[in-house]
Image (cartoon, helix red, strand yellow):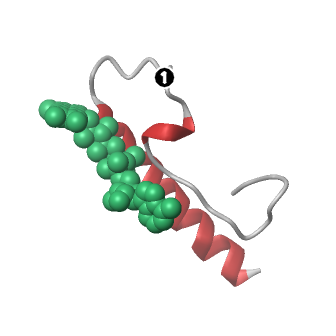
């Protein structure tokens, strides 16, 4: 969730273009997508 935009969740490659993923870009995209989804559920649960 964006600190300055509560309720806005982001995921994917552009979060950190220089991330040391070692080429596992799809894995990183899926992992941040999962984290964003879990964050949304926690946010909605209050
Ligand atoms: C040719 C090629 C081969 C690759 N091979 C591999 C590989 O073998 N293994 C690997 O791990 N990675 C590979 N990658 C990298 C991998 O595809 C990307 O890192 C990954 O797709 C990034 O996912 P993402 O969801 O962050 O972004 P994207 O998949 O780029 O998704 C972004 C989405 O946002 C949409 N969008 C953009 N602007 C807006 C807007 N204003 N409003 C609404 N929607 C918008 C776009 O249409 C797009 O659907 C490859 C990349 C390329 C180009």
Relative height, residue 31 to residue 25 (above, below):
below
Determine whether, in the image, residue 37 is placed left or right of residue 22: right
Residue 40 in the image, given as x and y percentages of width and height: 60, 71
Determine whether, in the image, residue 21 is placed left or right of residue 32: left
Relative height, residue 19 to residue 10 (above, below):
above
Determine whether, in the image, residue 31 is placed left or right of residue 14: left
Relative height, residue 7 to residue 21 (above, below):
below
Q: Can residue 26 be spotted in the picture?
A: no
Residue 8 in the image, given as x and y percentages of width and height: 68, 66
Residue visible at 69% across and 57% down in the picture: 1
Residue visible at 38% across and 23% down in the picture: 21
Residue at the spot of label 1: 19
Residue visible at 31% across and 33% down in the picture: 25
Residue situated in front as seen by the camera: 19 or 46? 19
Quadrant including the C terminus? bottom right
Residue 44 in the image, given as x and y percentages of width and height: 68, 82
Q: Is the residue marked by circle 1 packed among few (<14), some (14-19), or many (20+) residues within 10 Å?
A: few
Figure disc tally:
1
Residue visible at 79% across and 65% down in the picture: 6
Element type at mark 1: loop
């Amino acid at each position: 969730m964006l600190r300055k935009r509560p309720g806005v969740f982001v995921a994917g490659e552009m979060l950190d273009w220089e991330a040391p993923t070692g080429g596992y870009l799809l894995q990183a995209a899926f992992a941040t997508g999962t984290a964003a989804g879990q964050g949304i559920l926690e946010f909605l649960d209050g």
